[in-house]
Image: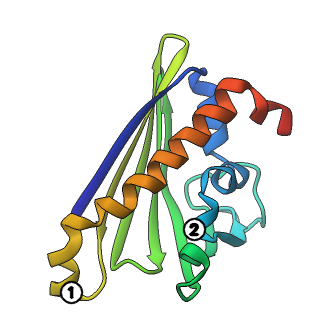
Amino acid sequence: MATYRRSVRIHAPLEEVWDFHSTEQGLEALTPDWMGLTVESVIGPDGEPDPDVLEAGSELHMSVQPLGIAPRQSWTSVITEREERDGAAWFVDVMEDGPFAAWEHTHSFFADGDATVLRDHVEYELPFGVLGRTVAPLSGIGFAPMFRQRHQVTRELLESGSWRRQR
């Protein structure tokens, strides 16, 4: 599988960065508008709709329409792991249905003094078999602006404290 990695240092405590990324609202806030994200439903691990926190076992049913011109595509992700330890936290979301042949995104958070280092690690496989594997090295060109914007929005919302006021 191909991989994509990106890191950013956010001048906000680990707890705040972790809380932000643990909610549907955080996902919606940091997804670039040009992705055309619609969250259709979120189901918690106990079957409860719209849980406050995306715990392991939560299912997100979404659709995306990049640039508003591509056909709208369904995307179902499941949070398969979610852990917090002293000075670190992470969760993994796995695409169960969607535009990629495979997608596993690990979001890792590490305390760094009063700041937090956020690391995204995505393992993915493009559709279309051999053709998808052939062009996979170029896919980082598309991922880079999306993750750059995600990290920029995360920094802006958390470093300014505006996300705390929105909750």
Residue nearest the observer in this picture, 65 or 164: 65
In the picture of the structure, the residue carrying the numbered disc 2 is 35
In the picture of the structure, the residue carrying the numbered disc 1 is 129
Image location of residue 22, percent across then percent down: 63, 45
Judge left or right: residue 128 versus residue 85: left
Image location of residue 5, percent across then percent down: 31, 47
Task: Work out whether residue 1 can be spotted.
Answer: no
| Residue at (38, 77) in percent of width and height | 100
| Residue at (68, 49) in percent of width and height | 23
Residue nearest the observer in this picture, 162 or 54: 162
| Residue at (73, 52) in percent of width and height | 25
Q: Amino acid at mark 1?
A: Gly
Task: Work out whether residue 44 can be spotted.
Answer: yes
For marks 1 and 2, give the CA distance: 24 Å
Of callouts 1 and 2, the N-terminal one: 2
Q: Residues within 10 Å of mark 1 (few under 14, many from 20)?
A: few
Position above or below: 167 against 68: above
Helix, strand or loop under label 2: helix
Q: Amino acid at mark 2?
A: Met
Residue 25 numbered tag: none
Q: Quadrant of residue 95?
A: bottom left
Mark 1 or mark 2, whichever is nearer to me: 2
| Residue at (61, 79) in percent of width and height | 68
Q: Residues within 10 Å of mark 2 (few under 14, many from 20)?
A: some
Helix, strand or loop under label 1: helix
Position above or below: 7 against 93: above
Question: Quarter holding the C terminus?
Answer: top right
Image colouring:
rainbow
Judge left or right: residue 19 versus residue 166: left
